[in-house]
Image (cartoon, rainbow, N blue to C red):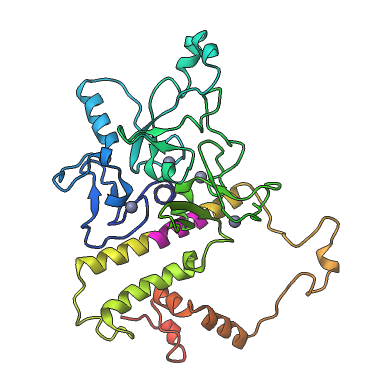
Amino acid sequence: EAELLDELVTKKIQGVRCEVCDIVEADGKFLTRCSGCMVTFCDSCTTPADGVGEENRNYKCDSCRYTAEKQKNNETFKEPRCHLCPQKGGWLRKAHANPINKKSYWKARPKEYQKTLFARPFWVHQLCQMWQEKITLDPETAEADCDQVVMTHGMGFILEQNRCGLCGIKKGMKARCEEENCRAWCEKSKGWNFHVTCARQAGLEVESQMDSQGWYRFYMKCFQHGGNSFNLRARLEDLIEIEKKRAGKSLEHANSRTMTFVHCSRLLNSAILVMQIMGWSWRWAEWWVEYNHTWEPLLEPGQKEEQMTKKELRIVESTKTSRSDDARRCRLAAFGAGLRNRDYDNVEKGDTVVLD
Ligand SMILES: [Zn+2]
Ligand SMILES: [Zn+2]
Ligand SMILES: [Zn+2]
Ligand SMILES: [Zn+2]
Ligand SMILES: [Zn+2]
């Protein structure tokens, strides 16, 4: 269980989906997949210098080529992984940083310099790079230029005092929720910050938009400010919509219409998103227990529960009818019944009979 959870929240699960812009190309026409590590991305997320072309059917990504070369020469090396976030795997590109000041300082201290990010190339996710305005791509080498984001001491990145609102880790580069008034829980006067990869995996709104001049704006929104299509219920409904497109409005052709590779691929990709969102909720629930938290958001210091009214405690009375109304309203009852494989709605005591 712990292993599966770790996979869900820290590793890319591959489907036919561009791991950078998140577009699903069900027929895979404009997608390239590395034959070594299976990372998948679309044409529009590459630059010409990446050397991805139609003729390149046996494409190997930079990090796979790097690993193969080191192994061939029997050299010791660190497995490439992104310096901007804690996520394993994914499409990596080489990055470098040059000190923008203190150049004479470093000249006098070559040993110290060797320990910094300035001394050697490192790796970053294409996804992490794209959402950081200050990291640019060198058009000739396709390397990420990190001069603007590495701290003067060369040991880390700017704004590392901000915690990622999902994994809690300060290291790496985070993007901020673009809503100006965004305030993160427990982070005084700070908005939500997230590693771009963490946010993408937890199903937050990590998107790009073309402006009137044809420039792309890359942005991210937190749990609170993201659009409705990014919440869990919408993701679940996506799954149903995909099936309705194939099998008719009330799924009447479910058995008569064939399920093609394209259908399967769409379903798989949507299901992966749902699993990842649940993975993050699960992880948070575990942390909650681990750190021995009690959840009392409504009790102010000095207040005593015994002396408070139901209204003050926001206790809502419910009845059988109000509960079933609520369930119908959130339209998850049918999904829940499906999960438990029981027939709730049709007949009395139907919840004890297992469906075929
Ligand atoms: Zn893409
Ligand atoms: Zn690869
Ligand atoms: Zn990354
Ligand atoms: Zn994170
Ligand atoms: Zn926000």
**Residue at the image point whose x is 39% and y is 22% from the top:** 120
Q: Quadrant of ligand 5?
A: bottom right
The image shows residue 336, relative to residue 117, as above or below, that is below
State the predominant SS element of the stretch in magenta.
helix
The image shows residue 324, relative to residue 211, as above or below, that is below
**Front-most of residues 4 and 124:** 124
**Residue at the image point whose x is 41% and y is 84% from the top:** 343
Residue at the limit of the structure toward the front, as seen here: 213
The question of residue 102 being in magenta is answered with: no
**Front-most of residues 35 and 218:** 218
Where is residue 82, by image quadrant?
top left
Percent x, y for residue 38? 25, 46
Q: Which residues are magenta?
A: 273-282
**Residue at the image point whose x is 36% and y is 63% from the top:** 271
Which quadrant of the figure contains the C terminus?
Answer: bottom left
Percent x, y for residue 333? 48, 79
